[in-house]
Amino acid sequence: MRVKSVIKLGTVAALTTIALAACGSSSSSSSQAKDQTLTWMESSALPTMDSSLATDVVSGETLNNTGEGLLKFGKNSTTHPAVAKSYSKSKDGKTYTFNLRKSNWSNGDKVTAKDFVYGWQRTVNPKTGSQYAYLYADVKNANAIMNGKKPVSTLGIKAIGDYKVQVSLIHPVSYFPTLVAQTAFFPQNQKAVEKYGKKYGTNAQDNVYNGAFKLTYWTGTSDNWTLTKNTKYWNAKSVKLKHIKFTAVKDPQTALSQYQSGKLDATYLSGQQPKNYKTDKEYHARNSSRVAYLELNQRKDTMMKNPKARQALSLIIDRNQFVNKVLDNGSKVATGIVTSGLAIRNGKDFATEGTIPAATAHNAAKAKKLWNQALKETGRKSYALTLMADDTPEGKSTTEFVQSQWSKLPNFKVTNANLPYKTRLARSASGQFDAVVTLWGADFPDPITDLSLFTSDNSYNNGKWKNKTYDKLVKEATTTNANKPAARWQNLIDAQKVLLKDQGIIPVYQSGKPQLVKSKVKGITYFPVSSNWDFSKAYIAK
């Protein structure tokens, strides 16, 4: 990510009114093919289309192209206009006013300020069970609502007429515009939610859409789904694609064959494939803000609660060998949970500043010594666990390699369990695992998007690692020092160091995203954070 695209942490502007102009398409009708259908490969099936419940990149990508929030992400993770045509911020940085354009849902209903109020309230309502509700923590009364202490009606968002939304924050949040670009902040049509009930967002029909496309085929369990141009979209005239056909292809060789035969316009590469195509004109090495880490279930297991055991499990892994010899796809060794290039301050990368080298080092002798000490301290002679991950090629490669590394520890047996993406997500969330390979992509360009995951009460803290110092540092960064850039930056640096020193998680690699895209595909927008893709300006050239 280029430095100019990175948000400077903690900055708060004076009263500003920002007029936002829609980005036009540079394509002309004469350069377009007649069949405007894009065929796109995914490695996993679509889990949900409920924006309050979606937690994964596949759901996020689909939601991002069938829905639209106040703002949207564009190239280099910059924010652009969406339903809001302009917005202003108060001098104290705690009040945002968004001016909405006139737009419609796919069923013809108007998209109004009340749809944002309802969508936000539904997401923070504890009865909904949204894992992303914590993103609302800076909105007035959100925390009290999530804890069941105040009604959802007290959330700091209100509709001023049909086309003005006012948001009240408890303190300034420099990255707030990037927050409202998330799918978790999308508007929701109350009539549709109540009409479809439990079926809402579980298939193509039981939903309505306000984005450039609408979902027209998806059974809820199918490995393929189809988006169709939404003629009710406010900027439908600029949308060139008629259809986007997604297909989940788990086998990389099958996907490559389908790409070569013209059945797919884009495919992700894995294994030895990237090496073979790096000089191809259709090859793209995408920058990624996604990190893979091992999460250990510390809820009850005394072995996983033992810091020496966690440190041993980290030290025994030769990450350089895995990244360079096994993956070989542009991935690199992770230095922490915050990926390189995500946040820069005074020319310094957070990923470099906030690392503890020992937390991602390889030292087999020390690992074995620590492991034996942990066995003795927990009264064990041996230990066994199951390592869970997705059933994707990358997931299988990771579990196989980690299993081979962990098996070098004395008296330790590791069993692998590679599960369908949707199943793995559900088991991770409910704590049904011993150890799990988790892949997390930053939602917005600020370290807090990664570091907030591991506070004691965060819904994404699946392993339930807890550290009072860590909680205190993250809280200071989001409250006391929210408007003090230097102090906030240091809070976050110190927090990551606490996480790494205690080996609250085991970072493994920052994911590369090598891809082949047909040269006839034009106008797609990729951004490293959040949902990654916007197809609203894409088209198929002749």
Image: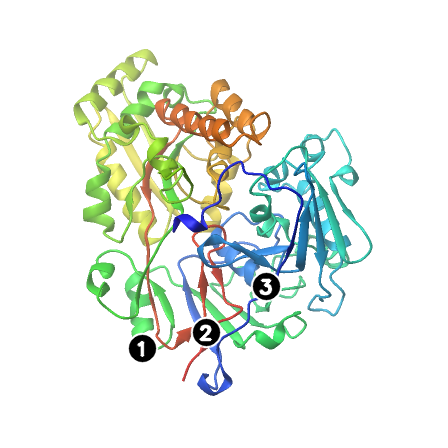
Q: In the rendered image, is residue 464 in sight?
A: no
CA neighbours of label 1 inside 10 A, class few (<14), some (14 to 19), many (20+): few
x, y percent for residue 531:
49, 54
CA neighbours of label 2 inside 10 A, class few (<14), some (14 to 19), many (20+): many
Res. 16 mark: none
- Identified by mark 1, the residue type is Ser
- The correct choice, above or below, for 164 with respect to 320 in the image is below
Q: Which residue is mark 3?
A: 66
Q: Earlier in the sequence, mark 1 or mark 3?
A: 3
x, y percent for residue 501:
35, 23
- The correct choice, above or below, for 476 with respect to 205 in the image is above
Considering the numbered disc 3 on the image, is that residue within a helix, a strand or a loop? Answer: helix
Considering the numbered disc 2 on the image, is that residue within a helix, a strand or a loop? Answer: strand
- Location of the C terminus by quadrant is bottom left
Tell me: 36 left or right of 517.
Answer: right
Q: Which residue is mark 2?
A: 38
Q: Which residue is mark 1?
A: 261
Q: Earlier in the sequence, mark 2 or mark 1?
A: 2
C-alpha span from label 2 to label 1: 15 Å
Which residue is at the far front? Answer: 14
Residue sitting at x 50%, y 39%: 449
